Image (cartoon, rainbow, N blue to C red):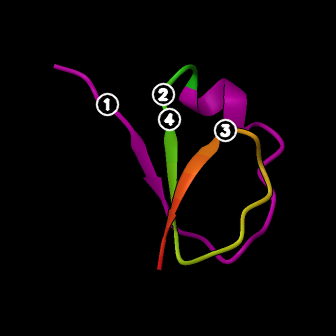
Amino acid sequence: MGAEAILLGSSTTSFPDLQKQVASLPVIELVNAIDAPQVKSRVG
């Protein structure tokens, strides 16, 4: 059984290797303002 999404909370605003790290999984950002096309939703 694998992950269906990645929940990401961080104090940095950019992740240059995010696409490589998450592959095709959607990324849900927690609180922060991450500027990346992989971020599909924000919480907080």
- Residue at 81% x, 58% y: name it: 14
Q: Alpha-carbon distance for marks 2 and 4?
A: 4 Å
Q: Alpha-carbon distance for marks 4 and 1?
A: 8 Å
Residue type at mark 2?
Leu
Look at the image and say whether residue 5 sits in the magenta stretch: yes
Q: Which of the two discs, 4 and 1, labels the residue nearer the N terminus?
A: 1
- Circle 2 sits on which residue? 25
Q: Are marks 2 and 4 in contact (CB under 8 Å)?
A: yes
Where residue 19 sits: x, y (%)? 70, 29
Residue type at mark 1?
Glu
- Residue at 50% x, 35% y: name it: 26
Q: Alpha-carbon distance for marks 1 and 3?
A: 14 Å
User: Magenta span: helix, strand or loop, mainly?
Assistant: loop
- Residue at 77% x, 48% y: name it: 36
Q: Are marks 3 and 4 in contact (CB under 8 Å)?
A: yes
Q: Are marks 1 and 2 in contact (CB under 8 Å)?
A: yes
Q: Which of the two discs, 1 and 2, labels the residue nearer the N terminus?
A: 1
Q: Relative to 18, does residue 31 appear above or below in the rendering?
A: below
Where residue 20 sits: x, y (%)? 69, 25
Q: Is residue 18 left or right of residue 6?
A: right
- Circle 1 sits on which residue? 4
Q: Quadrant of residue 6?
A: top left
Residue type at mark 3?
Gln
Q: Alpha-carbon distance for marks 3 and 2?
A: 8 Å
Q: Neighbour class for label 4 at 10 Å: few (<14), some, many (≥20)? A: some
Please tell me the numbered disc located at residue 26: 4
Please tell me the numbered disc located at residue 38: 3
Q: What segment is highlighted magenta in the picture?
A: 1-22
Q: Relative to 2, does residue 34 appear above or below in the rendering?
A: below
